[in-house]
Amino acid sequence: MPRSGGADRGRSTHAMAKDTRKTVLVAGTFDLIHPGHLHLIAAAAKLGRVVVVVGTDAIVERIKGHKPVIPERQRLFVVSRLKGVDEAVLGHETLDFTRIVADVKPDVILLGPDQGPSVEKWQAMLAGKGLSSIGVTRLQERINDHPLTSTSEILAKIKGTTGKP
């Protein structure tokens, strides 16, 4: 699903012609948008056309053990409007992440600095599904310019369980 709500407004017909840049897939919960998310998307945009897969509420709960604060449709809406995002889609209701990868057909998957699984595990999963032509790389540097660069840090601060400013 491309950006919704008229995201192509203001783009010329020429600009909407076939995009020849590499397609870069990034994925995550994107619950409480923070500098780490923006850093990842900006890095992906340097590599090509950015497609963001937003995790569904059910899958996030299965992986993290709790539901996101923000409902999936709202997270998708917000992510679709972030600078650098060319398209945002809601993930599938399965832990087989290669299914959404096969749908998006990226050239590259860009993982966040502390996002699992490992690059090697991703490569093995993709190879097992006949998708070995898709590159997998990890953003090496975690942004440290701000005190709250992860959703868990933000939630801890709200709950008063962190010493961070």
Image: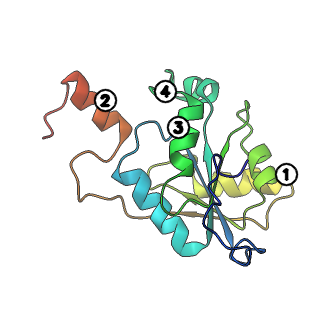
Marks 3/4: CA–CA distance: 9 Å
**Residue 147 percent coordinates (x, y):** 21, 48
User: Does any portion of residue 139 appear in the rendered image?
Assistant: no
Three-letter code for the amino acid on which mark 4 is drawn: Pro
Three-letter code for the amino acid on which mark 3 is drawn: Arg
Three-letter code for the amino acid on which mark 2 is drawn: Leu
Residue 155 bears which disc, if any? 2
Query: Dot 3 corresponds to which residue?
Result: 75
Q: Residue at x 73, y 54 (%)?
A: 124
- Nearer the camera: disc 1 or disc 4: 4
Q: Categorize mark 2 by other alpha carbons within 10 Å: few (<14), some (14-19), many (20+).
A: some
Marks 1/4: CA–CA distance: 29 Å
- Image quadrant assignment for residue 96: top right
* Secondary structure beneath label 3: helix
Q: Residue at x 52, y 74 (%)?
A: 46
Marks 3 and 1, the one that precedes in the sequence: 3
* Secondary structure beneath label 1: loop
Marks 1 and 4, the one that precedes in the sequence: 4
Marks 3/1: CA–CA distance: 29 Å
Asked if labels 2 and 4 touch by Cβ distance under 8 angstroms, the answer is no
Query: Dot 1 corresponds to which residue?
Result: 129
**Residue 24 percent coordinates (x, y):** 64, 64
- Nearer the camera: disc 3 or disc 4: 3
Q: Is residue 61 left or right of residue 101?
A: left
User: Does any portion of residue 46 appear in the rendered image?
Assistant: yes
Q: Residue at x 46, y 36 (%)?
A: 31
